[in-house]
């Protein structure tokens, strides 16, 4: 192949919407994974250099867009608060990554035929 001919690659992002707007995207899924890892919305937010308010708003939005909450939280107190993923939250993460894998494969396959 002539080195002066550019090689093109498809790039893309996707998200899952409900009638109310964005439900899941890469950032929201990463936040869910961090909540699972840290057991706290505030710790998850700090790890992503995000404000607690922004993280809480994202979690609240996801919970409202879903028939069942993705994250359940406990209020603070003597032992402190915390947050954990529900079974629905775990399924949402699994679904998102499965779709992303299919999406990335589609982009790679279509990129093979982009030469002009």
Image: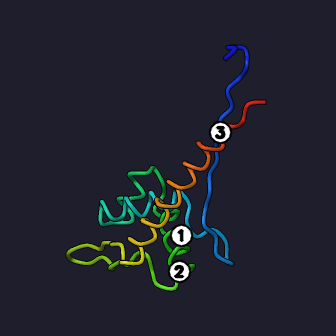
Left or right? Give the position of 87 relative to 23: left
Q: Residues within 10 Å of mark 3 (few under 14, many from 20)?
A: some
* Residue 21 screen position, x and y as percent: 67, 71
Confirm or deny contact between disc 1 and disc 3 (CB under 8 A): no
Q: Residues within 10 Å of mark 1 (few under 14, many from 20)?
A: few
Q: Which residue is mark 1?
A: 57
Q: Earlier in the sequence, mark 1 or mark 2?
A: 1
Left or right? Give the position of 22 relative to 43: right
Q: Residue at x 53, y 62 (%)?
A: 54
Secondary structure state at the residue bearing disc 3: helix
Secondary structure state at the residue bearing disc 1: helix
Foreground residue among 97 and 70: 97
Foreground residue among 109 and 10: 109
Q: Residue at x 49, y 63 (%)?
A: 96
Q: Earlier in the sequence, mark 1 or mark 3?
A: 1
Q: Which numbered disc, 1 or 3, marks the residue closer to the eye?
A: 3
- The answer to whether residue 61 is above or below residue 6 is below
Q: Which residue is mark 3?
A: 111
Calculate the distance from the C-alpha at mark 1 to the C-alpha at mark 2. Answer: 14 Å
Calculate the distance from the C-alpha at mark 1 to the C-alpha at mark 3. Answer: 37 Å
Picture quarter containing residue 80?
Answer: bottom left
């Amino acid at each position: 192949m002539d080195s002066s001919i550019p090689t093109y690659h498809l790039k893309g992002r996707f998200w899952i919407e409900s009638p109310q707007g964005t439900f899941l995207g890469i950032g929201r899924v990463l936040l869910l994974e961090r909540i699972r890892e840290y057991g706290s919305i505030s710790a998850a937010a700090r790890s992503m250099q995000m404000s607690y308010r922004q993280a809480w708003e994202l979690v609240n939005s996801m919970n409202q867009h879903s028939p069942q909450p993705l994250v359940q939280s406990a209020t603070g107190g003597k032992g402190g608060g915390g947050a954990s993923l529900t079974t629905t939250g775990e399924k949402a993460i699994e679904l998102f990554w499965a779709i992303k894998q299919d999406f990335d494969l589609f982009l790679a396959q279509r990129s093979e035929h982009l030469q002009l």
